[in-house]
Image: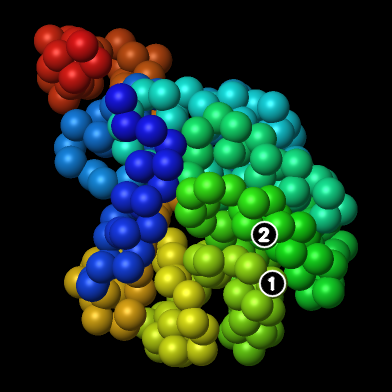
Amino acid sequence: MVTQAEKARNFKALHERPGCFILPNPWDAGSAKLLAGLGFEALATTSAGLAFTLGKPDGVGRVTRDETITNAHAIVAATDLPVTADLEDGFGSKPEAAAETIKRAVAVGLVGGSIEDSTREGDKPIYDIAQAVERIVAAAEVVKGLSFPFLLVGRAENYLHGRADLGDTIRRLQAYQEAGAQVLYAPGLRTREEVATLVKSVDRPVNVLMGPGGATVADLAALGVRRVSVGGSLARAAFGGFLRAARELKEKGTFGFTAEATPHTELNAAFD
């Protein structure tokens, strides 16, 4: 059994070695075990993957902190890999909410977690920078009191809410860095030039979210990116396969999808 402290040290070391590592996003214990079996070195939870598994929409505050922490606990327990979590906005606007969320994340064995500056409010989707910083400061105070390195991630959500303002995004991440965030993340950046400018503008490891048609891991490593995640993409790929199979059943009454299904024996062996 690998201890939480050992996982934390292993996770920190991934950020300190040369190059860039992939941080895939399982949505439950089973997907976590499969990713570990493929040789990935660390895992990150996904708010979208969890929301869809629960039959809820993502990004509108419908998934509770209890649900998020329970899901993270199951993923942590499934493998010996370090796990960091998408902790959304800390589940509350006040700094105390962010601090409590980090405390609960630590309690279930996580070794990292993100606090984002999205408000979940349509007319004002992003916190004022001063309030956003206060929330990072509160979360960082919890981390400082630990006996192992818990990597707090500061997330700037501008680009996910139609605010493609690189200057403001960089100012925010610089402020989160000063407030105690050890990793920085701005999901939704569109170009290599934006990524390169961000990396050069901060003094912490940068996480980049990738999707179809983007740069490769090697490309991002050359830009100075330390880690790459895919958010809900793996979960959506799984749901995509499920929907294609279900539509074939409903619309055609045929069973061709079974030819591409992972064999029962292979999954049994992976989960044994």
Give me the residue at 29% from left, 74% from top.
220
Position in image of residue 101 (x %, y %): 70, 42
What residue is disc 2 on? Answer: 140
Position in image of residue 170 (x %, y %): 60, 83
Residue 122 higher or lower than 48, as above or below? below
Specify the label residue 179 is tagged with: 1
Left or right of 17: which side holds 207?
right
SS class, disc 2: helix
Image quadrant where one finds the C terminus: top left
Outermost front residue:
147
Q: Quadrant of residue 132?
A: bottom right
Residue 180 higher or lower than 230, as above or below? below
Gap in angstroms between the C-alphas marked 1 and 2: 7 Å
Left or right of 270: which side holds 11?
right
Colour setup of the view: rainbow
Residue 145 higher or lower than 254, as above or below? below
Give me the residue at 37% from left, 82% from top.
192
Position in image of residue 50 (x %, y %): 54, 32
Q: Quadrant of residue 130?
A: bottom right
Identify which residue, 46 or 81, lies in the foreground: 81
Decide if residue 190 is in sight here.
Answer: yes
Q: Which tag, 1 or 2, sits closer to the chain's start?
A: 2
Q: Are marks 1 and 2 in contact (CB under 8 Å)?
A: yes
